[in-house]
């Protein structure tokens, strides 16, 4: 099915409103979620909507949170998300980071007691509106093994950075610290396909290509896949995100990060902190040098890399290019949805007695 961008967003918002989310927050949450589909990150888009409702059903999601600053300095803050939608909590955290950066030059916000916040890139890009460099990262449930481990101790733990330019589109890097996000495995599961090499290992720690490996006791591998291909670097990146998002904020961390949704093979257990954590930051460009000079040089940087001599049949791209191009296309032509995702959306429509008109 090809879903209309605006109709899909309105439907998602109506689902969030059905569980008690205030209209403005429901619209924001829907915007964050559908932006993932628009940018081609289908693993983090409306395919996750049913998971948020499962969180609500299990008492792990507060649809109307009282988001509060619990500690702050002129340039930093810790906020408690009150078990709210990360789709709402993280944008508030970025607002605070930008406010602090406006006053102090940089602003950094650690978040605890939140939930899954969608794609990291959405939050990092919010700083662009203020001529700032934005950072966003979050940890996630333990599905990933450290290099040489059989135990799952880390999440996919993505990092995003958004950097403004002058006439060129912004530089936007948004990537997991694993070879792939777990949502990509879910897509392969729905399609009945195996994984490429370097994505997963089985319960005994052996490399495999089973898209169901995690449900069968296996694990995702860090970025790099194995030690010979640099998995220790992916492990280090994931660990850095976990420490900033969890240890620094007072959220759970490592193997204690709660799962996104209770989906049969995972459930929330022991805690060492409060909920899920994020880490967001904003850097005012003119705290370092005149913004126009910086953006002029960013244009030059982007143009030089874009014009790099490429290998046959390939083209050098700038981080953020594919997502930006696809976003324009999908907002105009529609968002493709897999049948299992459509089935989940129809079930939510029936449950909440909502009209299902997204095409």
Image: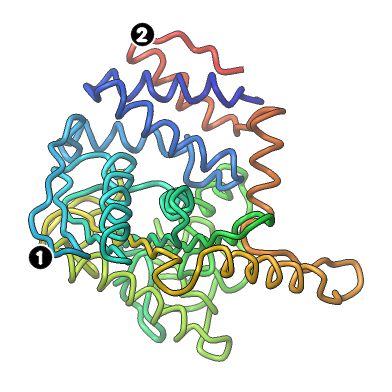
The residue nearer to you, when weighing 59 against 9, is 9
Identify the residue under disc 1: 272
Q: Is residue 131 above or below residue 64?
A: below
The residue nearer to you, when weighing 354 against 82, is 82
Left or right, 308 with respect to 298, comes to right
The residue nearer to you, when weighing 153 against 210, is 153
* Quadrant, the N terminus: top right
* Quadrant, the C terminus: top right
User: x, y percentage for residue 262?
Assistant: 27, 44
Check disc 1: other Cα within 10 Å, few if <14, some if 14-19, many if 20+.
Answer: some
Mark linked to residue 212: none
Identify the residue under disc 2: 353
- Whether tag 2 and tag 1 are in contact, CB under 8 A, the answer is no
User: x, y percentage for residue 256?
Assistant: 19, 64
The mark that comes first in sequence, 2 or 1, is 1
Q: Residue most toward the bottom?
A: 228
Residue at image point 43% right, 51% down? 130
Q: Is residue 69 above or below residue 233?
A: above
SS at mark 2?
loop
Q: Is residue 339 above or below residue 109?
A: above
């Amino acid at each position: 099915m090809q879903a209309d961008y605006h109709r899909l967003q309105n439907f998602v918002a109506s689902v969030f409103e059905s569980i008690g989310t205030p209209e403005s927050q429901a619209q924001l949450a829907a915007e964050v979620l559908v932006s993932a589909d628009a940018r081609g990150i289908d693993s983090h888009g409306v395919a996750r909507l049913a998971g948020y409702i499962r969180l609500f059903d299990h008492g792990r999601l507060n649809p109307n949170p009282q988001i509060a600053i619990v500690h702050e300095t002129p340039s930093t803050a810790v906020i408690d998300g009150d078990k709210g939608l990360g789709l709402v909590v993280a944008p508030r955290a970025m607002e605070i980071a930008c406010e602090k950066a406006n006053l102090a030059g940089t602003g950094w916000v650690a978040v605890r007691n939140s939930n899954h916040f969608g794609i990291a890139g959405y939050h990092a890009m919010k700083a662009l509106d203020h001529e700032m460099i934005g950072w966003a990262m979050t940890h996630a449930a333990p599905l990933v093994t450290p290099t040489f481990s059989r135990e799952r101790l880390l999440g996919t733990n993505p990092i995003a950075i958004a950097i403004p330019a002058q006439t060129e589109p912004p530089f936007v890097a948004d990537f997991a610290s694993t070879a792939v996000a777990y949502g990509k495995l879910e897509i392969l599961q729905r399609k009945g396909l195996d994984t490429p090499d370097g994505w997963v290992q089985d319960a005994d720690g052996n490399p495999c290509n089973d898209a169901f490996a995690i449900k069968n006791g296996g694990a995702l591998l860090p970025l790099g896949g194995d030690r010979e291909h640099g998995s220790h670097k992916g492990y280090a990146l994931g660990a850095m995100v976990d420490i900033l998002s969890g240890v620094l904020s007072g959220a759970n961390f490592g193997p204690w990060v709660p799962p996104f949704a209770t989906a049969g093979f995972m459930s929330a257990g022991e805690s060492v902190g409060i909920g899920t954590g994020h880490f967001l930051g904003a850097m005012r460009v003119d705290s370092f040098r005149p913004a126009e000079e910086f953006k002029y040089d960013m244009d030059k940087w982007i143009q030089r890399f874009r014009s790099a001599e490429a290998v046959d049949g390939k083209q050098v791209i700038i981080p953020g290019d594919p997502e930006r191009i696809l976003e324009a296309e999908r907002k105009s032509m529609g968002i493709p949805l897999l049948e299992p995702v459509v089935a989940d959306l129809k079930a939510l429509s029936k449950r909440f007695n909502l009209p299902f008109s997204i095409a």
